Image (tube, rainbow, N blue to C red):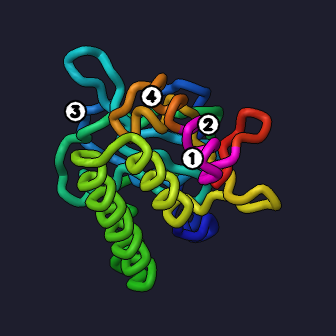
Amino acid sequence: MIAGELLEKYGALKKSFSKNEIIFEEGNLPSHYYQIISGEIKMSNYNDDGREFIQGIFYKDQSFGEPPLFLNQNYPANAIAVEDSEIFLLSKNTFMKLLEEHPAVSLKIIENLAQRLYYKSVMAAEMSTQEPEHRILKLIDTGIAYFNFKKDENGYLISFTRQQIGDLTGLRVETVIRTIKGLEKKGILKIINRKVYR
């Protein structure tokens, strides 16, 4: 996303977060731009039954939580470290100054936000109407493009856990497991050492 050197030049701090540590909470007003140096972050909230719904998962070099920062609105979800992570934090005012002084970076941010909006629009349409097989394949195929999953001799390694697939598609984890096994039998997915490949 934004080069680390540029963020540091503008005074960004590097902060470490332990697995399951909250970075910011739903309802809080944003004060910083966040960009992942290493690790994995999820943005999620819970419904009235206490079921988690994952809004998005973010990896190395990706940023998260910008829309409320631009809109000066409260965060609509929690940001939580999925694993030990290190993140750049840049204060909101300094981030806005960086964007004003670097138009090419502003365009990159706009492109990134547009890509996320497109991804959410595609997924929302799929999640509301389609069968489990279709939902899971759409998530995986969109994820291959959006999350840059690694490819090896087995195909694309899907970095999501079964639970994350369930939380991202609105399916129960048991349904995800059963559906993935069915897709493996049809030769659409591969399961190697409990890892899913497309």
User: Mark 3 = which residue?
Assistant: 27
> 11 above or below 197?
below
Please give left or right for residue 45 compared with residue 177 in the image.
left
> From the viewer's perspective, is the residue at label 2 or at label 4 nearer?
4
Sequence-first tag of 3 and 2: 2
User: Mark 1 = which residue?
Assistant: 87
189 falls in the magenta region: yes
Viewer-nearest residue: 37 or 164? 164
User: Mark 4 = which residue?
Assistant: 175
Viewer-nearest residue: 152 or 174? 174
User: Mark 2 = which residue?
Assistant: 16
The three-letter amino acid code for the residue at tag 4 is Thr
Sequence-first tag of 4 and 3: 3
- Between marks 3 and 2, how big is the CA–CA gap? 23 Å
Q: Which residues are magenta?
A: 180-190
Seen from this angle, which residue lies furthest bottom? 104
Sequence-first tag of 2 and 4: 2
The three-letter amino acid code for the residue at tag 3 is Gly
Would you say the residues marked 2 and 1 are in contact, meaning their CB atoms lie under 8 Å apart? Answer: yes
Quadrant housing residue 70: bottom left
Task: Name the residue located 62 percent from the left edge and 33 percent from the top edge.
Answer: 83
> 5 above or below 81?
below
- Between marks 3 and 1, how big is the CA–CA gap? 21 Å
Name the quarter where the C terminus is drawn.
Answer: bottom right
